[in-house]
Image (cartoon, coloured by chain):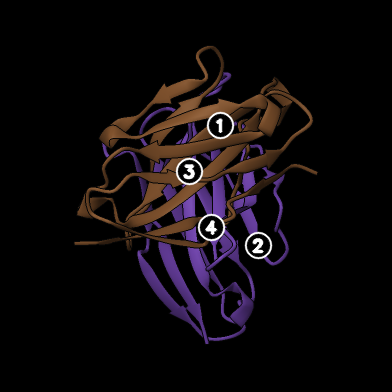
Chain colours: A brown, B purple
Amino acid sequence: AQSVTQPDIHITVSEGASLELRCNYSYGATPYLFWYVQSPGQGLQLLLKYFSGDTLVQGIKGFEAEFKRSQSSFNLRKPSVHWSDAAEYFCAVGLAGGTSYGKLTFGQGTILTVHP
Amino acid sequence: NAGVTQTPKFRVLKTGQSMTLLCAQDMNHEYMYWYRQDPGMGLRLIHYSVGEGTTAKGEVPDGYNVSRLKKQNFLLGLESAAPSQTSVYFCASRPRGGGNEQFFGPGTRLTVL
């Protein structure tokens, strides 16, 4: 069965520090990979996505993520965190192919706290 | 474009009551999804639809029913609510075709007493 793991439930960083959120997946085929962010009381907003090609993808708000097939990972990074980045972050994985119907499997989420 | 909207935003039910959550999208998307979000469990797929008149079960379908009579609307029903269905419910939609992301609504917070 497919699975997505975000090993860190809660991460705390200081404003201006760098950030890396981990995501590991277990899929039998080439996956589509996504990172979403959820601010308190809000819906999910797409940060970035990977389908194919360059394994380093750029997203909104200064985020980037790198797909490493050998490690089954898709970690999210930001060089300098802002207080407004405090939120919950979700990694999601989907399968290519028509019969997958775009369904996604989500990780458990990582809550990011930013100290001033 | 309003995107994906959900009605209502909040609801409190008593055990055994029924209700319907409405999801509407104005992006002409073929695929629509209902998820529930519980602390520490991420989002789990309840049901989904790949077109008007079609529905299918997701990961956690028990206790829920859905209908998609119109392309733009996807209804989630609870026939006899249970406290275990206390959750935040999200609807999402996406176009048909490989590699497209899902667009999410703002969520409905449901409490079952």
Disc 1 or 4, which lies upstream in sequence?
Answer: 4
In which chain is the residue bearing label 3?
B
Q: Could you tell me which quadrant the C terminus of chain A lies in?
A: bottom left
Disc 2 residue type? Answer: Tyr
Residue at 67%, 33% in the rendered image? A71
Disc on res. A91: none
Disc 1 residue type? Answer: Leu
Whole-angstrom CA distance, mark 1 to mark 3, is: 17 Å
- Residue designated by label 3: B92
Residue A67: quarter of image: top right
- Residue designated by label 4: A8
In which chain is the residue bearing label 2?
B
As rendered, which of A108 and A67 lies closer to the eye?
A67
- Are discs 1 and 4 both within one chain? yes
Disc 3 or 2, which lies upstream in sequence?
Answer: 2
Considering the numbered disc 2 on the image, is that residue within a helix, a strand or a loop? loop
- Residue designated by label 2: B64
